Image: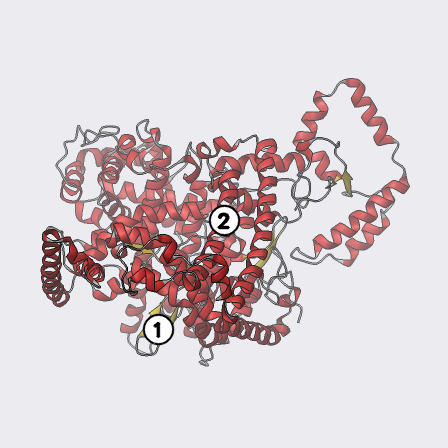
Amino acid sequence: MSSPNINYRSLAEENANPFREAQIRDEPPQQQQQQQQRQATITKADDAKSFTAAAHLDANDHDNTVGDVDGEEEEDLHEHEDTPRNIMIHIVPETGKESHRWNHIEDLDSFFSRMYTYQQKHGFRVIALDELFQVLEFSFVVWLFTFTTHCINYDELFGNLPNRTKTTLDEVIIPTGVCITKFGFFTYLIIFIAAIYLGIRVLKMIYHITQYADIKRFYNTALGIEDSDLDNITWHEVQQRTRRVQAEQHMCIDKELLTELDIYHRVLRFKNYLVALMNKQLLPVRFHLPLIGEVVSLSRGMLLNIDFILFRGPGSPFQNNWQLRDEFAVRSNQTELAQRLSKLIFWVALVNLLLSPVIFLWQLIYFSFSYANILRKEPSALGLRTWSNYGRLYLRHFNELDHELDARLNRAYEYADRYLSSFSSPLAAVIARNLLFISGGVLLLILALGIYDEYVFQVEHVLTIIAVLTIIGVVCRTFIPDENMIWCPEQLMTAILAHVHYLPTEWKQQAHTAHVRNEFSNFFQFKAGYLLSEIFSPFVTPFVLIFVFRPKAMEIVKFFRSFTVSVRGVGNVCSFAQMDVRKHGNPDWQLNNSDLPDVANEPAQHLPPHHYAQQQQQQQQQSMIGGKTEMSLVRFTLNNPEWQMPKEASQFIKGIREHAIDELVKAKTASQPAARENPLTHSLISFGTIGEEYCSIANSVLAADLSPEQLQISQSITASRAGAGVGIGGAHAMGAGYVAGSDFGMLQMLQQNLGEPMSSTSMRPGLMSSSVGPAVAMDSMRRLRLSKAEGRIEGPTDTLLYSLYGGDPLLSKNRIGVTVADMCLSALYLHEVSQQKRLARQSRIDEADEQPGPSNRPSRPPGPSGLGLGSGSGSGSRHTVITSKAAESTPLLGNIRS
């Protein structure tokens, strides 16, 4: 895992290291003089050797960077070989020190992934025991299968032998020697295969334990974190300490310092690719089955096969954990690479088909053992719902760790369950009531007779009948609606959207329809359906790989070639995971005052139809559907406030907050009907309907007085849009107009939309209509261990809520809760802005159609069904995507070599 204690470092990096300067200042004068003398005695021969080694390392490094070195620079480099600059030297730390063993870790992806797993699974002892019990579970299943097949006398057990009054355990269990003599060829074959797998699994367990023992030493020595403290420390704190260790010891030799995004890239490199592939509809999620129709499913077995085919298997596009194969950088190799990938998918599918009976039997036994005790005590557990693998991948942000995703989906669980439970079929309800009545009557009769005479329970198959009747009752109760349930699908869908952040735009105002309900049930399925899909997936996966995934080989190759970039110190990553809103942002999610291009708002009639259509196609190919890039950036900045984001990202985040402040000022200075049309007002009202704690925050924001800073920001935005400015005095006049003229309209709107009436006194900043303040009310938002917390404990210092409401002491008492609430409001607000921009663009297109003369309307861009790569071009070919200049401008390793 870790190389010898050698740390390669350039002189420029060594001199720029702040930790080195502090160390030199702390040394005594004598040691400083000795250090200067040692540096003065370095000969030119030593410099030449060091420079030769550095040139070799730099050559490898330049292969993974974007751009080529000019010939003039190379000649200049050789001319100054006697006095090299920026040479790479290696520093051998003092031996015998545990803290110096983390220099130059070769596979940082695996190292950081194990670090994350170690923190989330609570330390070394838990992980070691879990690995050991996994091996014991497999051994137990093999032993139990052999024992129940050959070592039980079933005639004695079932009382089939005559003249038997009492059966003992020794009579039922066959002795070991006699049992072994009954083994046949099939049994020995199973034991032989199981022994081979068990041996491999034991070696893997030993390897994992040794690796995590190394991680334990890293936590205890380098990070200064004991295992007993893991539950009381956040991953954010672990990440910050790791960055300090990198600055001191250089775990990564290619960079002096690691950023938060670098660590996320290392842990989630392949997961980010899967998120982008899902958004581009390149994963085999939807397919047709005979006699069933369209099925939406993504089993764990399918995910493991896709991970093996694309990332980890021999012949996969990635040659190791951090580097894509060099052939993908050459455009002329696409056909050959697609054929190679197609063959790989075929052979993997064939192996799955051959092993499907064995895998099916194993999964049936595994799930039966795992859920037998739960179903015995709570049969209704099958009626519960869970987030499907398809839903988890569809709703996942770029650069979102597992515990962050789990926390977000757990907050939406109650709303999602209530939404789906609010739908009921009258026909199914009538049938379920009658079946429940009949099954309940039969069950009551059997129980009554059993109470009268216990011999009734010894009658053959009576217990089986009781179990079947119980299951029928549980299933029937799921189809009977709750008589006290209130029908509010739109409000529940709004609450779901606030937490999951991604839902199709076509669902807006359609939450009451059966179509939306059925589509959402693919994200949030019954536990019983999830188990059945996992158990029978071995028979479905091979055919889905061959007939659904294999035809997309060319599109997948183009995707990897066009959307892979090389990041210094990280390797090859998905370009969408960089969260570059200028390059991969969706125009519908951009704001005018963020200094980003707003092509979506350009009048269609000012562009030629073919140019507009081509522009729209390029934008859709380069962007993500549903604002995933923008939403991922907002979430990442909230959870990692120390991250030094690029200029474009900073402008985008700043633009969101300034745009929201401008709309808040307009809402408070406009009449009530105009305020209702404001995207921010609509978002705050929707935000307030989620729950009591959110309502308290929305009331505070809408009822607070405008600050001079907010008024000034609004005036500057209005002036920049209109081309003329308004003085600060005008801003104060606007604020005075708000206090005097529109207070009653705002109060009336709050009363109508957010509940109980509120007086102007109770709505001053810091005073809530409820007796519970915002910080106290938000305590119910987050009741997690610190190890599962999102972001840092202190929370971010610059958020959308703080921009709208200010740093109120009550609001800042629960900064983690503010982070969650701020992301919910940001998601709702961005969706409202995006919806408004789409409607405005459609209105302009319709107006162009109504103009006399030849139609200026451009060809309509692909709809939601054509998600980027899946949509064809004008020629109708599905393999002509990602061939535009915009797509070719993001090659893998610099300029395209054709």
Amino acid type at image mark 2 = Glu
Comparing 307 with 254, the one in front is 307
Q: Residue at x 50, y 54 (%)?
A: 577
Image: 848 above or below 9 = below
Q: Which residue is mark 1?
A: 857
Task: Give the quadrant of residue 513.
Answer: bottom left
Disc 1 to disc 2, how far (Cα)? 32 Å
Please, which colouring scheme is shown? Answer: secondary structure
Dot 1 falls on a residue whose secondary structure is: loop
Task: Give the quadrant of residue 615.
Answer: bottom left
- For the C terminus, the image quarter is bottom right
Q: Residue at x 68, y 40 (%)?
A: 103
- Packing grade of label 2 (10 A; few <14, some 14-19, many >=20) is some
Dot 2 falls on a residue whose secondary structure is: helix
Image: 866 above or below 258 = below
- Packing grade of label 1 (10 A; few <14, some 14-19, many >=20) is many
Comparing 592 with 234, the one in front is 234
Q: Earlier in the sequence, mark 1 or mark 2?
A: 2
Task: Give the quadrant of residue 34.
Answer: top right
Q: Is residue 522 left or right of residue 654?
A: left
Comparing 671 with 873, the one in front is 873
Image: 565 above or below 647 = below
Q: Position of residue 16 (x, y in %)?
A: 69, 35
Residue 216 makes an appearance in the image:
yes
Checking the image for residue 648, the label placed there is 2
Outermost residue toward the front in this view: 163
